Amino acid sequence: MENSVLRQQIEAIREEIKENSKLLESSKHVYEQRKVFLDNKNGKISALMKEMKNIAAEDRAEYGKNVNELKQWALEQFDELDKKMKEKELKARYEREKQDVTEPPKMRYQGNLHPVTQMRETLIDIFEGMGFEIYEGTEIENDYYNFTALNTPADHPARDMQDTFYLSPEFLLRTQTSSGQIHVMENKKPPIKILSPGKVFRSDDDATHSPMFSQMEGLVVDKNVTLCDLKGALETFAQKIFGEGTTTRLRPSYFPFTEPSVEVDCSCFACGGKGCNLCKGTGWIEVLGAGVVNKKVLENCGIDSEEYSGFAFGIGIERATMLKYGINNIKLLYESDLDVLKQIDHYE
Ligand code: PHE
């Protein structure tokens, strides 16, 4: 082959490398291109080397020198490109993985106590502040503590006020935390000041009732305890739960274990007493049942009703929660829907 043709071939490869190099975008491309030209077996420059044996003896030395030069040049070319690409890639990676240490942290949802638990703890806080102690009874009770000792004997019509789940003729799921009153009075002499929170059960199920719900019983027994003490304690409670301007009123009612018995209404905290949807236009909201402990109940527990008197109250914890947060269906409190539950955070 003519010398000049050989030189043209070499130059053509040099041009090809130059042209191709312009299109390379990554170190991976560079690696692939390097193989196209320099791979020992199939590389284009290696192919030129293999031509050596076909070259006229007198041209061989020059040809060899030119090819080697091209190979050397190509090696440097690719090394340089490789270095450039790797630098560019590293920079891009730094950019991509950059952390702004001055950026404020992303807020993560922390979780909160269930609204009913929050209300229960708030109530406990309030009454503990007034000197009440906690007594937690059992959910399974016998008929005596849930009814008979509370002045509700077997044939008493007031048993119909609470649809009871009986486990046997003797045992039942307590329908009220009032059963705790009897346990406490049987075991402790006055002065007594207890709070008894817990689950209660009634065969009742609609938008505002559930077969299981929670109550908080309060009981005070001492010398000279009157309805005024009850009103004072409950007014403090109402103001702490529903706001400072809240007032209470007592409405006559009936419970077998209190005499007199009252329903305690709070002035509507949504409208301030003017009348709105929440209070059904009356300006008052019924919050709990209470009364002066019936003498018969004191006597049932061996407490002298001439010397001592007391008051008791029972708050529905779900009811208080629903009122405070404007929840109209008790089921929302039991469905574990986080979108609902996380909106209510008293401790925020
Ligand atoms: N135990 C009553 C109820 O569940 C509430 C109550 C408690 C009433 C204490 C008076 C005194 O309806």
Image: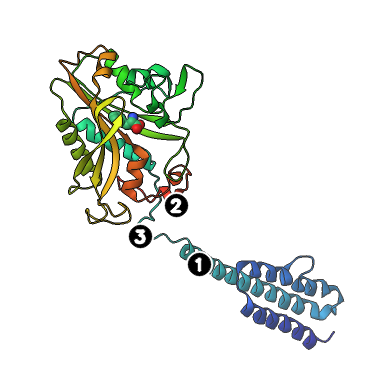
Residue under numbered circle 3: 103
Q: CA distance from mark 3 to mark 1?
A: 21 Å
Residue under numbered circle 2: 339
Q: Amino acid at mark 1?
A: Ala
Q: Which residue is painted at 29% across and 43% down in the image?
A: 286
Relative height, residue 165 to residue 120 (above, below) = above
Q: CA distance from mark 2 to mark 3?
A: 28 Å
Taking the image as drawn, is residue 213 in sight?
A: yes
Q: Position of residue 112 (x, y in %)?
A: 38, 44
Write down which quadrant ligand 1 falls in: top left
Residue under numbered circle 1: 92
Pick the front one: 291 or 132: 291
Q: CA distance from mark 1 to mark 2?
A: 40 Å
Q: Amino acid at mark 3?
A: Glu
The crowd level at tag 1 (other Cα within 10 Å; few <14, some 14-19, many 20+) is few
Q: Position of residue 9 (x, y in %)?
A: 76, 83
248 lies left or right of 3: left
Q: Which residue is painted at 39% across and 41% down in the image?
A: 114
Pick the front one: 298 or 92: 298
- Cβ at disc 1 under 8 Å from ligand 1: no
Do residues under tags 2 and 3 come within 8 Å of each other at their CB atoms? no
Q: Position of residue 296 (x, y in %)?
A: 26, 18
Q: Nearer the viewer, mark 2 or mark 3?
A: 2
The crowd level at tag 2 (other Cα within 10 Å; few <14, some 14-19, many 20+) is few
